[in-house]
Image (cartoon, rainbow, N blue to C red):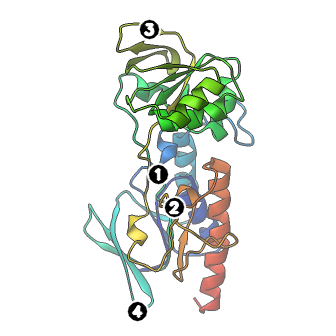
Amino acid sequence: MVFDSIIIGGGIAGLQTAIQLSRCLRKVAVVDANGGRSTAAKAYRNILGFPDGVSGKALRDAGRTHAVRLGVQLFSDEVSELSERDGLFSARLRVAGSHLQGRTVALAAGISDPFPDIPGIGACLGKSVFICPDCDGYETVGQATAVIGAAPQAADMAVQLRYYTDRLTVINHAGSPIGPREGETFQSLSLDVLNERVERFEHQNGMLTGLVLSGGDTMSVCRAFLAFPGARVNTDLLRPFSVRFNEKGHVLVDPRTKETDHRNIWAVGDVIPHSQQVAIAMGDGAQAAIWIHKRLQETGE
């Protein structure tokens, strides 16, 4: 079978692309390695209609059910290689070893974050421990909050969070040098900076109650933001193609259509440069799908 589109990534952006394309009566394959930031998000609270929050898992589960009902074929696998020949794309599945063929491709593989291996962090991620101040800065209002990470990234995060709370402490968990810029930032914000490691997140059902530090003290906090370098944009599959990237590795696309510079390859969600929010990922997916359908109509498919 030749699919009208192969969508690489089954997160929010990928599933929305698939749903919209299926409603255009297109044959769609979604290859999902169960990655991306939505896997860690336990309570999105900034989405229309969900004032009490909804988890990334719940959205993905609902999206998969919706997509399958429309005829989308889901593959729980990872694309290890993407190639093009005679106007068709071929995606090799790492586990199955087989190939999928498609007329178009949409990359929606998201970002992989370098979460530190600290006991208790998994239960708190996306519930009381966050990474995106645009998404969850509001959650710190009136709350004792820690910024945990490396000094340069922690300084940038602190500037954004200081808008929401003055109960802010920076923990230089990575032990990175505090340069003049960071020192000036911390001083201007009147922030305490602790050069210690976090040994454990204490919590109740994922709601942070304290941080056990390497010096033996327990800091009482209700919220924490992670600020570590090394987040990886999952765009390596597009490196062999005539696609442009920015300095952080995000794919550059046409802002209207979400198509890359390589004809018939689209990119949506966190792999492109934008505010990394669920609502925007959904918009990317719907928008890309509309233009994929138009392209297929142009070529008589």
Q: Closer to the camera, 70 or 126?
A: 126
- N-term-proximal mark, 2 vs 4: 4
Say if mark 2 contacts mark 3, CB within 8 Å: no
Marks 2 and 4 sit apart, C-alpha to C-alpha, by 27 Å
- Seen at 34% across and 59% down, the residue is 77
Residue 53 appears in the rendering = no
Q: Position of residue 134 (x, y in %)?
A: 66, 40
Cα–Cα gap, marks 2 and 1? 10 Å
In percent of width and height, residue 211 lies at: 45, 15
Q: Is residue 155 left or right of residue 161?
A: left
Quarter of the rendering occupied by the C terminus = bottom right
Of badges 2 and 4, nearer the viewer stands 2
Q: Which mark is residue 218?
A: 3
Q: In the structure shown, which secondary structural element does the residue marked by tag 3 occupy?
A: strand
- Cα distance between the residues tagged 3 and 1: 32 Å
Q: Nearer the viewer, mark 3 or mark 1?
A: 3
Q: Secondary structure at mark 2?
A: loop
Mark 4 belongs to which amino acid?
Asp
Q: What is the spatial separation of the Cα atoms under label 4 and label 1, in whole angstroms?
A: 31 Å
The residue tagged 4 is: 86
Which residue lies under the disc numbered 1?
111
